[in-house]
Amino acid sequence: MQGIDTHAHVFSETAPSVPGARYRPPYAATLEDWRSHWASAAVARGVVVQPSFFGTDNSEALAAVAADPAHLRAVAVVDPGFGDEVLARLAAGGVRAIRLNVKSKPDYAAFATADWRALYRRVHALGWHVEVHVDTGRLPDIAQAFADSPVAVVFDHFGTPGAEPAAQDATFAAVASLARSRPVWTKLSGPYRLAGADPAALAARWMDAVGGDHLVWGSDWPWTNHERENNYGRLRDALDRWVGPERARTMVWDNAARLYGFA
């Protein structure tokens, strides 16, 4: 059985980034390049995640999905000004979630305003989820934003709790609280973004908190700012070490297919 890579970024070299972008890679990451790695990890489908430096212009992610809609889905970046018709067009283009990339934002309170909470309810009505990328140790700060919506939440990169035991405990307490009122997931991805935390130990804590059926794997290709230290096949093999081969197979196919609507 082949798997699904639930987290990769596709972008051109020349498309402009939004003003104030935190980082813009000086190269292209093409769909062809990404797919050239799939055989090394028995991957057959993928999810294109909108990078932060394009803001809410999802055109490149949508173009990638349009090139192979049977095998690709997308996670878009939107804001509360996106109307229902626009969200419906995104859904028709293969979008199955929105992404909140709040990394490096000093104040997460803006994402808990009435407009954003209304957006989360509309996202839930579409059957989508909210994918969240937070600064190290700050998952509890964003969790409250979803308090009055049943929308499913997926945290990037193990939820980035950091290596400090107190921060990990606070993170998983927030996860457990959030999971009482809606599905909560994480992507076992980006182990090089964990500030020294042990990915196997974090995977075990996530399984205790939300169950093994709410974990998926992502390559995080092309590993921005960590390009030289990574290898696609080895990252997939690492999942077997973190959770065991049998559970890994369930995560990379059954769980991911259910979350992103693959047959």
Image (spheres, rainbow, N blue to C red):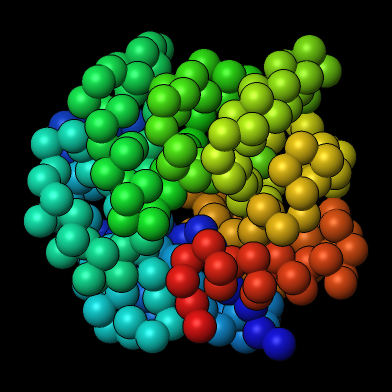
Answer yes or no: is residue 43 visible.
yes
Q: Quadrant of the N terminus?
A: bottom right
Q: Residue at x 49, y 44 (%)?
A: 152
Q: Quadrant of residue 204?
A: top right
Q: Residue at x 46, y 71 (%)?
A: 261
Judge whether 4 appears above or below 96 on screen. Answer: below
Residue 118 image point, x, y percent? 25, 32
Answer yes or no: is residue 97 visible.
no
Q: Residue at x 43, y 82 (%)?
A: 71
Instruction: Name the foreground residue: 6 vs 184.
Output: 184
Q: Residue at x 89, y 63 (%)?
A: 244
Instruction: Name the foreground residue: 155 vs 101.
Output: 155
Q: Is residue 206 left or right of residue 161?
A: right
Residue 120 image point, x, y percent? 33, 37
Judge whether 160 appears above or below 36 on screen. Answer: above
Instruction: Name the foreground residue: 12 vs 239.
Output: 239
Residue 214 image point, x, y percent? 67, 53
Residue 154 image point, x, y percent? 53, 45
Q: Quadrant of residue 231?
A: bottom right
Instruction: Name the foreground residue: 153 vs 230.
Output: 153
